[in-house]
Amino acid sequence: MVTSSAARVRADLLPLLGSLGPGGRLPASRALVAKLGVSATTVQQALAALVAEGLVETRPGAGTFVAARPDAAEHERPDTGWQDVTLSASLVQTAGLDEMLRSPTGDGILPMAVGFVATELQADLRLPAALARAARRPGGWLRPPVAGIPQLRSWFAGQLGAEAEDVIITPGGQAALSTVIRAVVPAGESMLFATPSYPGALAVARSHGLVPVPVPEDEDGVRPDLLERAAARTRARLVYLQPTFGNPTGTGLAHHRRAEILDIAHRHGMFVVEDDWARWLGHGAPVPPPLYADDRHGHVITVNSLTKVVAPSLRVGAITARGQVAARIAALRMVDDLFVSGPLQEAAVEVVTAPGWAVYCRRLSRLLGARAAALSSELRAQLPELPFRPPKGGTSLWLGLPTGVDDAAVARRALAHGVTVTAGRHHLAGDQPETWLRLSYSGLPEADYPEAVRRLARAVADVSAGAGQ
């Protein structure tokens, strides 16, 4: 990471590079430290940034030199108009993911559009130290087993009550969902989605050429009567559920519905992809067991991820499945990625098996629960007319909007007022008359909630006034 002081030193060195020309030797680091009045670390960071940009090169024992640059003519952008003729219409759909990953940040903007857990909540994990140890471990950079290292497979299996041989390690939950969906459903077919749903799963389905079919949820999760009807009508091979805690709702599948959902899957010969992303993100109450644990016929394929609970860049997840579908999933994972980075897996094992892991998870659950309660309180106080169900887990809340108010317009207006939220349409598999917003509370300190909701209330009022004219 380049600090602001290193960035300033980099900028100060650019004129020097121009005057020296290609092949010119830069002063030694000690001379730069003395000349610029900064630390040796700052100079090293600035030089590393210039190396990464291809502006300078280091020669061991000789020093640092201005890199030779190709002629400007070689950098002219080609005319790519021919590609418009050759390429067909793109199937790749990124709606919802774009908004999440490219959500504006900066001074004065209050982020409620990204569901990653704030850095200050993850301070106890000591992930950098675990990664450093994994990188130094003898043999750590050799090729790991294709399905994942045994210790990590065993740990995920223990969380589900599964067998380690049924677990396949993946580079995150998104890759796991992509693999499962593509392995089970041929392009052109329908796939059922408990709605509202996760935009990343919807994006995979649409990009694979599938037709997402919504199955509405109520306060107890996906409705069995509508799931039965949709399964009979579409003969879908796969339904996507978030039984533990949903994104965006923060609620899950009620206990009394679990057996009925599995019976429907068995009756129709349908697989269930259980997105168990929030297993470690409850809000203090006991987290329900995975649906996988109740499945006696191999219908449930469970996806887990450490990304939300540990850190966004720890792209480590798992698929747990039984039977022939597991072999198909494993084959597709091999084709896609060969294997997951060994040091990353080793670091993940160290984090989740450390003595402090359980304490960390309890603390994180307590803090997320407090944030959810604080946001709920602010919404009741400032926007009492808008409906929502208090989340029981996860990182977000599903807020209803007044009839006729456009969710995307509210999201745009909210950004203009300095708070980011997600338009609910990105979580829907089909057309729905009601409009909603997803509010994430995991990345914003509680102290900022009153102001964030004030800004949101102004945005809702602005758009509502326009809709009523």
Image (cartoon, helix red, strand yellow):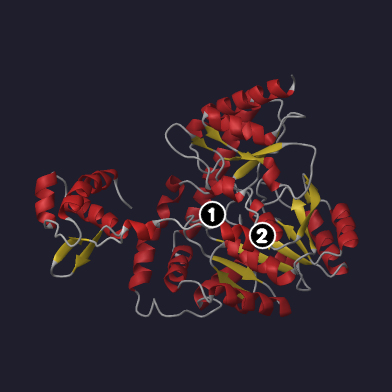
Q: Badge 1 is on which residue?
A: 308
Instruction: Please say whether residue 290 is visible from this viewpoint.
Output: no
Q: Amino acid at mark 1?
A: Lys
Q: Amino acid at mark 2?
A: Val
Q: Position of residue 83 (x, y in %)?
A: 58, 60
Report whether residue 27 is seen: yes
Residue under numbered circle 2:
204
Label 2 sits on a secondary structure element that is: helix
Mark 1 Cα shell of 10 Å, populated few (<14), some (14-19), many (≥20) = many
Residue 114: name its quadrant.
top right
State if disc 1 and disc 2 touch (CB < 8 Å). Answer: no
In this rendering, position of residue 345 left or right of residue 181: left
Mark-to-mark CA distance, 2 and 1: 19 Å
Which residue appears at 81% of the width and 55% of the height? 257
Comes first in the chain, label 2 or label 1: 2
Label 2: how many Cα within 10 Å (few below 14, some 14–19, many 20+)? many
Q: Nearer the viewer, residue 78 or 299?
A: 78
* Front: mark 2 or 1: 2
Left or right of residue 338, residue 218 in this image: right
